[in-house]
Amino acid sequence: MPPVADDEEWSDSDEETGSEVETSVLLGTPDGAITAAADLADAAVSRMGGHPAFLPSNEPPFSSSSCKTCSQPMELLVQMWCPFENSPMDRALYVWGCAAAGCQSKEGSLRAWRGLRYNDEYAAKLEKKSAKKKATPPEKSTPKANPFSRGEISDAESDTASDEELLTALAATTLEESPWRSAPSYPPLYLSTCSEYLPAQPKLKLPPGVQVVDSLDDVGKGSKDVSWIAEAYENSLDVDQVFERFTKRVGFEGDQCVRYELEGTPLPYASDSVLDSLFPLSPAPLLPSKRVFECQLMPNLINVLSTGDSQDQRKKLTDEERRKLVEQELKGGSSDGRRGMEWGTCLIFSCSKDCSLTDDGKEARESWREEAVLVQWGV
């Protein structure tokens, strides 16, 4: 990926049309089949498909993966290693989905769970880092943290020799002699991450006194791509406008299967009741519980899991072919009655404080909690 242009390099010249701007979104893409047993058992290895590697020492109930419509066990769609920055808890997010035709568009056919486990060694490193930070002047700037790594600990310059060891989070429970082992599954693929880059929009040279309002697709210097929210209802967005914006944004990186932006803004797929609940006309709580947007699953995930395609295989298709494939699947798909998922995007909202509490409200060293899932099913 090309680097983000420095402020000094930003200009109104036409030459800027070829540059790219980094957003605050991390993209998850397929990165080949997982064949190593050690990686399959490592909860710190993010994946698509396969069987889960659990963090809690006690195996979670098998019913966690059950579809709430047909009650059958569902396939694991993704497992993401995503500990909160400066948290002593190891953390992984698990999402299951049902591919039964009769369960599509039904609530409970996609479910997300969060596994937490207290990391004593990492907690000690955080304390050491905190003590050093108090004793030294603050840094001018810090790089954007990658939620799929423990990279921020290196900033403490403390005992870096064991940092790599912390990135191995062997599952506390093995799936041998377990119903999880016999659960249906897709072939496991590595899930790697990269920053999202969008083409920079050249500044228009207008006559004096003329003003314009940023469009839905404008990405400016330092943009977080949220300007469109304020004007969403002013422009009376309809299904086609929202969907076209979705496909245009996704088209810049057609291989993306996950968009990750903790406490960020989801990319809506369609104008529906889900969109209305996220961006109401007047201020209102996002959700009844204290949850924030964490990530969303993208249409390409359906294609990758159903075909077992790796990233290299997908690159055999052109961007236009990938776009048409996604639109075909989501605007009706095939009519042969085959089994398959048919959602547009799956939005996951997580506890903002990453709480690990027992039923009586006490802090626990590990936990297994279900998170909120909102699904936009299609147009």
Image (cartoon, grey):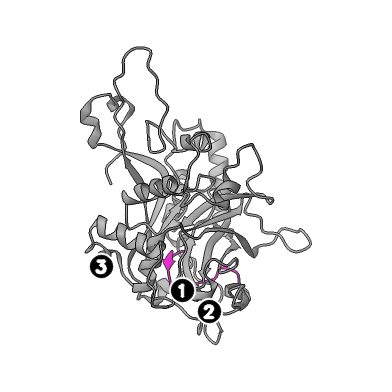
Where 116 sits versus 250, above or below?
below
**CA–CA distance in space, label 1 to label 3:** 25 Å
| Rendered location of residue 192, percent (x, y) | 37, 59
Q: Residues within 10 Å of mark 1 (few under 14, many from 20)?
A: many
* Residue found at the far top of this picture: 208
Residue 57, position as x, y percentages in the image: 61, 72
Numbered disc in front, either 3 or 2: 3
Disc 3 to disc 2, C-alpha distance: 32 Å
**Of 27 and 215, the residue lying toward us:** 215
Which is nearer the N-term, disc 3 or disc 2?
Answer: 2
Query: What residue is pinned by disc 2?
Result: 174
**Residue type at the position of mark 1:** Ala
Please provide percent x and percent y for residue 96. 52, 69
Q: Which residues are magenta?
A: 44-57
List the residue tagged with mark 3: 313
Amino acid at dot 2: Thr
| Residue 238 appearing in the image | yes
Quarter occupied by residue 66: bottom right
Q: Is residue 319 above or below residue 334?
A: above
Helix or strand or loop: what does disc 2 sit on?
A: loop
Residue under label 1: 41
Q: Position of residue 290 (x, y in %)?
A: 66, 49
Q: Are marks 1 and 2 in contact (CB under 8 Å)?
A: yes
Instruction: Say what amino acid the circle numbered 3 marks.
Output: Gln
Q: Name the N-terminal-most of marks 1 and 3.
A: 1
